[in-house]
Image (spheres, rainbow, N blue to C red):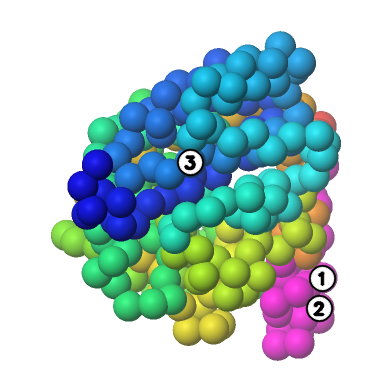
Amino acid sequence: MTETQKTSPKTSVISVSYHTGPVLFEMIASVLAQDGIAELVIVNNGNPEAIIQKLQAIASVEPRLKLVTGHGNVGFAKGNNLGAKAATSEYLFLLNPDSVLESGDLQKLMAQSRALPRPHLIGPRILDGNGKEQSGSRRDKLTPWTAFVETFFLYKLFPKHPLFQRWKWHKNPLPPAITEVPTISGAAMFIPRDDFWLVGGLDEGYFLHVEDVDFCFALRKVGAKIYFIPDLSIKHIGATSDAPKPFIERHKAISMVRYFHKNFSDTTPRPFLWLLYAAIWSRYYLMLLR
């Protein structure tokens, strides 16, 4: 090994797994094949015993695979924080367990990070299994107003009005180069380790969903820049967990209400927030009826 190889920066990839399914091992193989990988930290938030045994067997012969287990299902935010505490590298890459990397992806992310001012957070373009960009890949700031526009489809009524634009930007033209955006997806977030802890990591008050939006909000408040890389795409299969949909949607509603109460209760009229909360819970109960 050369001196350059010994001193070159490395990345700890962190992935929180809950009944992920077979794609988990496809993710593991794609990550361990990357140049620049120091370790892959799998946080077991709940998997069948057979899967845990298979992970342990891989870890026994692959020193770069680190398994954090035995804590139960503590949620996505706390799971990622546990992984970050167990990580040892200069860079952290939070990656959903149902995502697959292409050769060279990690090196591209590290190269971009080294070229950017600190603090920062980087997100690639997230594609679904059919190759289409997912809606969370790049987004505007989530405010009570942008949520209201999105919830009631006001962007369809006033498509050209600047006050009625979608907060999801996945259908907008791709920028020609890396560009600053307000919010990226928690499915793939690359960040220098010190910048991650600048805001205390992810808010563990979120069990599932919206923690990535809140994380971007918190980073922006301390002056961090958030970047979207249009020419680096990562496949995110999505919806591979066998968690019941009502369970997922309930936590999504809880997290939405928490986000707005935490970040906007002092700046937004209460009646408007109450209307928004009613819309969030109405959407959930309509889903149950369907």
Along the viewing direction, whichever of 141 and 222 lies nearer the viewer: 222
Q: Do the residues labelled 2 and 3 touch (CB within 8 Å)?
A: no
Relative image position of residue 144 (x, y in whole percent):
65, 72
Asked whether 8 falls inside the magenta stretch, the response is: no
Asked whether 277 falls inside the magenta stretch, the response is: yes
Which residue type carries mark 1? Trp
**Magenta region:** 259-286
Which residue type carries mark 3? Glu
Q: Is mark 2 on a helix, strand or loop?
A: helix
- The numbered disc on residue 143 is none
User: Residue at horizontal 43%, vertical 76%?
Assistant: 119
Relative image position of residue 22 (x, y in whole percent):
55, 16
Relative image position of residue 74 (x, y in whole percent):
80, 45
Mark 1 → mark 2, Cα distance in angstroms: 5 Å
Which residue type carries mark 2? Pro
- Position of 89 with respect to 265 (left or right) is left
Dot 2 or dot 3, earlier in sequence = 3
Vertical placement of 55 versus 100: above or below? above
Residue at numbered disc 3: 39
Residue at numbered disc 2: 271
Name the quadrant containing residue 162. bottom left
Residue at numbered disc 1: 274
Residue that lies at the very extreme toward the top in this rendered image: 50
- Local packing at callout 2 (Cα closer than 10 Å; few below 14, some 14-19, many 20+) is few
Mark 3 → mark 1, Cα distance in angstroms: 45 Å
Dot 3 or dot 1, earlier in sequence = 3
Along the viewing direction, whichever of 165 and 191 lies nearer the viewer: 191
> Can residue 288 be seen in this snapshot?
yes
